[in-house]
Amino acid sequence: MFLELSEPSSTPTAGEYAAARETTLSALAANKLTAYYRASGDYAGTTFRTLGVNAGDHVGPDDLSAITLLGVDVSPRGVRTLQGDNPLSDAVRATLSAIAPGADLRTATASDLNAAWELHAAIKAAIADPTTKGDSNPWVTAAKISARKRPSLIPVRDRVVGNLLGDRALQSAFVYWQLMRALLLDAEVVGALDGARARIAADAAGDLQNDFGREPDLRILDAALWVRAAR
């Protein structure tokens, strides 16, 4: 079920997965999920993925605008770093080039997850504040930028859903990603995702956000868990 990674602590336990699976099935069945994708509503929905230009090889202005829909932003210094010509922005571009734009968490290998981590780490280094006392660790913002750039591979990991899935999922991106990957490979969860997708499309009808038909299953899973945790 889980990938063999170099860090043993990155493997979820059977109990952690069983709890995540139960929570996920309940979240996907919730009627409140439809609100997340209504055009007249005030949730990010598909706009997080579709806003403006989402280039495959760099982090652009539209990416930085899109993450504000999820309640985070990048400082002026971080914006200049990401948009400039410097070793930190070069590292972000290099890590993006190592991950195909259509990479999918369902078929991800251990190498793919390591590349995703390198992307997250490069973005985090670029937006960190070097003047902050102690370590500046903007991991939530970096996770959301990473998810915008590779929405079928990298889930939106933050404290809200991390707490929902357990302490180790909150503390370790690899535990979190492994749980999400296993959920996307679970036949019952896949059926629940298909049901949620159909229910959202039917319930929202003419009020459905643009491009919902191409919304990755990972994004719907993200949204369902966030709605469950936030409510």
Image (tube, rainbow, N blue to C red):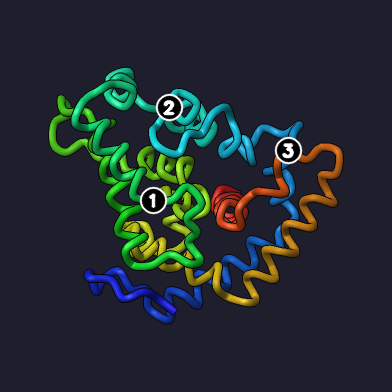
Which callout, 1 or 2, points at the residue further toward the start of the chain? 2
Q: Residue at x 21, y 25 (%)?
A: 86
What is the C-alpha distance between the residues marked 2 and 3? 23 Å
Q: Is residue 116 left or right of residue 137?
A: right
Amino acid type, callout 1: Ile
Between residues 6 and 173, which one lies in front from this camera angle? 6
Whole-percent x, y for residue 201 in the image: 80, 50
Give the x, y percent position of residue 193: 67, 63
Q: Residue at x 25, y 40 (%)?
A: 137
Mark linked to residue 209: 3
Quadrant for the N terminus, please.
bottom left
Quarter-of-image position of residue 228: bottom right
Residue 170 figure quarter: bottom left
Res 2 seen here: yes
- Amino acid beneath label 2: Gly
Residue wearing tag 2:
60
Q: Nearer the viewer, residue 143 or 105?
A: 105
Q: Say above or below: 5 vs 176.
A: below
Q: Position of residue 208 (x, y in %)?
A: 78, 40
The residue wearing badge 1 is 99
- Answer with mark 2 or mark 3, whichever residue precedes in sequence: 2
Q: Earlier in the sequence, mark 1 or mark 3?
A: 1
Q: Mark 3 packing: few (<14 Cα in 10 Å), some, or many (20+)?
A: many
Task: Describe the element under mark 3 as helix, strand or loop.
Answer: loop
Q: Nearer the viewer, residue 28 or 46?
A: 46
What element does badge 1 sit on?
loop
Q: In the drawing, does residue 185 fall left or right of residue 214?
A: left
Q: Identify which amino acid the numbered label 3 is placed on.
A: Gln
Estimate the spatial distance between the alpha carbons at disc 1 and disc 2, rounded to whole Å.
Answer: 17 Å
* 169 or 182: nearer the viewer: 182
Residue 123 can be seen in this image: no
